[in-house]
Structures are given as C-alpha cells and as structure tokens.
Image: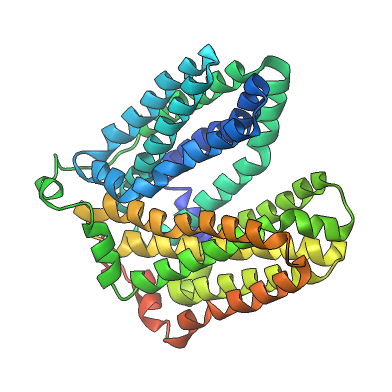
Amino acid sequence: MRKTWAVLHDRDARLCLTGVLVSGFGTSALWLVSGVWVKDLTGSDGLAALCMLAMWVPTLAGPLLGTIADRGRRKPLLIGGNLLLAALLPVLLTERVAVVLAVLLVYGATGVVLDAVESALVAGAVAPSLLGDFNGLRTAVNEGMKLVAPLAGAGLYALSGGPAVALLDAATFVLAALLYRGLHVREDGPRPSSRRTPFVEGARHIGAHPTLRPLILAGATTMLFAGINGALMYAVIDGLGHSPAYAGVLYAVQGAGSVAVGLVSGPALRRLGERRFAAYGIALTAVGAGLRAIPSDPPALACSAAIGAGLPCVLIAALTAVQRATPNALLGRTVATANTLVYTPNVLGLAVGAALVEPVDQRPLSAVLGVVWLAASLPLFQRPASASRIASRSPSDANPA
C-alpha cells in the first residue's frame, strides 16, 4: 500500500485525482437529474431515457474522437474542454427539451475526448510502476462520487429544480479547469504523425499487441455479461420480496466494493500482473452474479459487494496496460478505442437481459450466467503472468507519454 499512497505525494497525480473527483461529482449529479428533469417537463418516459442515451452514444465514436487528443498539446485541451462544458451547461436554463438533449450529446462527446486526454497526460506524469495505483484510486474516487453525488443532485433538484443542478455542474468544471491549470507537464507541439495516421490505428495497435488484445477482449466480454446481470436486478429484488427501492441498497453495497478494490489495485497489479489481476476479478464477479440465484438477503448483499469488487479489476488492468504499452503519439486514439470496445457491449447485454428476464426465471438464468461468465476468465489464467508482472515492475518499460 505504500506505493499507492506514494501517488498522493505526487503533485500532478493529486491535482488529476482532485479534478476527477470534482468534475465527477457534477457529472454524476447531472446524470441522474437530467432524466428526471425531462420527465417532469414532458411526462415522457421515452424522452427521459433519451437523456441517458445522448450522454452515452458518443462513446461509439471513441476511435474518431480520440484523434483529437493526439493532435496537439493535451494540457490546454484538457483545460479548454472543461471550460467548454462550463460555458455550455447554463444553456440548460432554457428548459427546452431539444436543447437539453443537444447539450447532453455535446457533453458526452466532450467527455470521451477528456477521458482520452487525461489518461494520456497521466501516463506521462506518473511513473509507469505507479499507473496501476493511480487508476485504482481514480476508480475509487469515481465510485465514491456515484454513491454521494446522485443523492446530492436529487436533493438540490427537489429544492431548486434542474437549473440549479446544471449550474452546480458548470461550477465543478470551472474548478476542475483551475486544478488542471496547475499541472506541471512537459509537452511537445502538435504531433504531425497524428494528422497522417488514421483513427483506426488505435484498433490496429490493440489487435496486434499480445498483452492488450486479450485484456480488451476480456473487458468487452465482462461488460456484455454485466449488462445482462444489470437487467436482472429488479427480478432479483422481486425474488427477495422487497420493493424496487431496495435497488439503492444493493447499488450502494456494490459501489462500496468498487471503492475498496480501487484502493488495493496497485499492490494487486504488482503482485499478480495485469492478466491474473483481471482474471481473478472476472472470476469473483462471475461467482457473485451466479450466487444471486439464492433468494436470501445476506447472499444478495455479499454478491453485490463481490460484483462491485470484481468488475473494476479488468477495467483497471486494461487501462493500465494501454497506458504502458502504447506510444505517446497514439495514446489518445488507443484509450478512446479501448473504451469503445469495452463499454459498447454493455448496452447489448442490457438488451439481451431485458429480453430474457420476462420469459426465463431469474434464478436459473443467474446461475447459468455465472458459469458462462466464469469461463470467460479462463483464457487469462492459461498463460504465465510473469511477462506482465515484469512489465508492471520494470522502470525500463517504455513511457507512453
């Protein structure tokens, strides 16, 4: 754990983590409130659901949007992107549904770019041996905000309405921009190679790399099954005999598990290497999903904690591997492409789960899902993890930024 906390002694790492915390608070608050706001304005469940879609759908364009992160200096782009969102959000005060959806679409697209930019900057500011610790702490911060911010946003919305939440989110982006302004990073000028190299180079790099390819595939498979598992949530609650509001309890326990694993990810990555760390996380998640077939509160709570702890492992391992194994000039596109490849299957999984949950009983469905999901971890166990373990410890590993 010493190296994990050593990350906090690095000024640039602290600033990045604080910026993630601040902007993540505003984003999590708006994520919940935007749908409620549109529902109150129109009475339409469909339009409310479009809010979530508008913020998520730009992820599909990740390989293309990621090229923006490779075209020039990243620190000014990170600051400018946050200020752009801060200036854009007050437009929501018009309370016109079409405007809200358009703003959320730009919000989502800008977020894709900023995620790629931040990951690339961190890869250059943090020692390669500490990237796993940083990414773990980043996960802990994000998951912690997901526990707190939606409640705060809902409370503010109840008191003052949607415009107040939009202004709060805008203020968090201004504060994040000020924090990022303090980063001490050395960057070259615009990268000519990024103008010549097509956006598909990120996908080609992942496909050709022996470490990245299996990790990204495992991440995509995990998120596919996570979508199916998420669609079964309310069927699980019905089996426990609780009201739908009990989902809040299960999500809180799951979030606590994610925070916990984020704090220990750095030491675990150094000990196990990316492949085995991801494999153990997938196996833990699969067991948690499968045991949801037991209709009892204690197992249900334990399963939520297990899923929360296991699910981030492959995501942290994959991002850390991408940062370590990707040349600086290609890092923005590769991070954004990896995010697209990993997170897009989650939507497909939600659709599959929604189609299965009515005609098929939840208990056998959860049991089968757990077994199939567990099988997805086996390829990562099959090869020795020594290569990735050495890479995670070696300072001679190429610094991708």
Q: Is residue 231 among the parts visible in the rendering?
A: yes
Q: Residue at x 31, y 76 (%)?
A: 210
In the image, 271 versus 91, the foreground residue is 91
Q: Residue at x 48, y 61 (%)?
A: 315
Q: Residue furthest top?
A: 94
The image position of residue 8, as x and y in percent, is 48, 48
* Residue 385: quadrant of the picture: bottom left
Q: In this view, does 118 lie to the left or right of 5?
A: left
The image position of residue 258, as x and y in percent, is 62, 56
**Is 91 situated above or below 118?**
above
The image position of residue 38, as x and y in percent, is 61, 25
**Is 369 situated above or below 379?**
above
Q: Is residue 1 among the parts visible in the rendering?
A: no
Q: In this view, does 201 lie to the left or right of 228?
A: left
The image position of residue 114, as x and y in percent, is 37, 40
* Residue 356: quadrant of the picture: bottom right
Q: Residue at x 60, y 17 (%)?
A: 164
**Is 381 situated above or below 128?**
below
| Colour convention of the picture | rainbow
Q: How many marks?
A: 0
Q: In which quarter of the image is the N terminus?
A: bottom right
Q: Residue furthest right?
A: 241
Q: Which residue lies furthest to the front in this view?
A: 359
In the image, 127 versus 287, the foreground residue is 287
Q: Residue at x 31, y 46 (%)?
A: 121
Q: In this view, does 378 lie to the left or right of 184?
A: right
